[in-house]
Amino acid sequence: MSSQSSSTDVITTLESIATYLFRFGGLILVVFGSIGCILNVMVFSQKSLRKNPCATYLAVENIFNLLFINSLLLSITLESGYSIYFTSKNIVLCHLCYYTSLFSNVLSSYCLILASIDRVFVTSPNASTRQRSTLRFSYFCIIGGTIVWMLFHSPSLVFTNITQIGENIYMCFYHVGFYLAFISFYSIIKESSSTLLLLICGIWAVKNIRRLRRVILPIVSSYSTVARV
């Protein structure tokens, strides 16, 4: 009897800790994350940066980050920390919440990768490669990528549902089965491939900068020699 009561006390304590973590920690993440994204969009949308493809990618990335924060993260914070259940009681909001979180999350990484690729273009010693860094190309990639990824994640509008997991406890989640397994593997592949691509682009850009330095230094030294003569 005492062991059962002690285990019940432990479970109750853990539930209370989780509730307070979401109530305060989740709220801090949502509020400051949203403010940070809005400020970043304002910075990268300034008139002096509007013609910069990299700034365009980063501005759009923060828009998708803002969507992600105020869809899934906000939903989890309200339900776990404040017992405000809107996705668990409304099937339309359930579908939209998971759909928005999926495509906004992947498009955020997509735009960050595009910004890294743009830095590779800009730092390239090849003039034709540098010319690929254009505003028109950035718009094409952003619009095209948004359409593709939104269509790719459209099955989540069908394969999410409100499921009862306990007495008077409901949860909005993916259907158990193929789609849940697919999303699990897809998330692992997406995160690992995004990290790998960002690492490759970063190393590539650094190598390009070093090559440019090797080219510029001899030119500068030759000019200084001519000036002395």
Image (cartoon, rainbow, N blue to C red):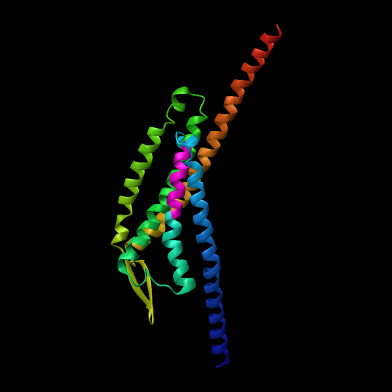
Q: Residue furthest left?
A: 158
Q: Is residue 78 left or right of residue 87?
A: right
Q: Is residue 142 left or right of residue 34?
A: left
Residue at 49% from the left image edge and 72% from the top image edge: 81
Residue 7, quarter of picture: bottom right
The boundaries of the magenta stretch are 54-66
Magenta span: helix, strand or loop, mainly? helix
Vertical comparison of 138 with 158: above or below: above
Q: Residue furthest right?
A: 228
Q: Residue furthest front?
A: 47
Q: Classify the position of the C terminus by image quarter.
A: top right
Q: Is residue 213 left or right of residue 35?
A: right
Q: Position of residue 73 (x, y in %)?
A: 46, 62
Q: Position of residue 21 (x, y in %)?
A: 55, 70
Residue at 60% from the left image edge and 21% from the top image edge: 216
Camera-nearest residue between 168 and 174: 168
Vertical comparison of 193 with 220: above or below: below
Residue at 40% from the left image edge and 53% from the top image edge: 104
Q: Residue furthest bottom?
A: 1
**Is 115 inside the magenta-drawn segment?**
no
Vertical comparison of 87 with 59: above or below: below
Q: Position of residue 184 (x, y in %)?
A: 41, 59
Q: Classify the position of the N terminus by image quarter.
A: bottom right
Vertical comparison of 198 with 25: above or below: above
For the question of whether residue 53 can be seen, the reply is: yes
Q: How many marks?
A: 0
Camera-nearest residue between 211 and 131: 131
Residue at 61% from the left image edge and 25% from the top image edge: 213
Q: Position of residue 17 (x, y in %)?
A: 56, 74
For the question of whether residue 114 can be seen, the reply is: no
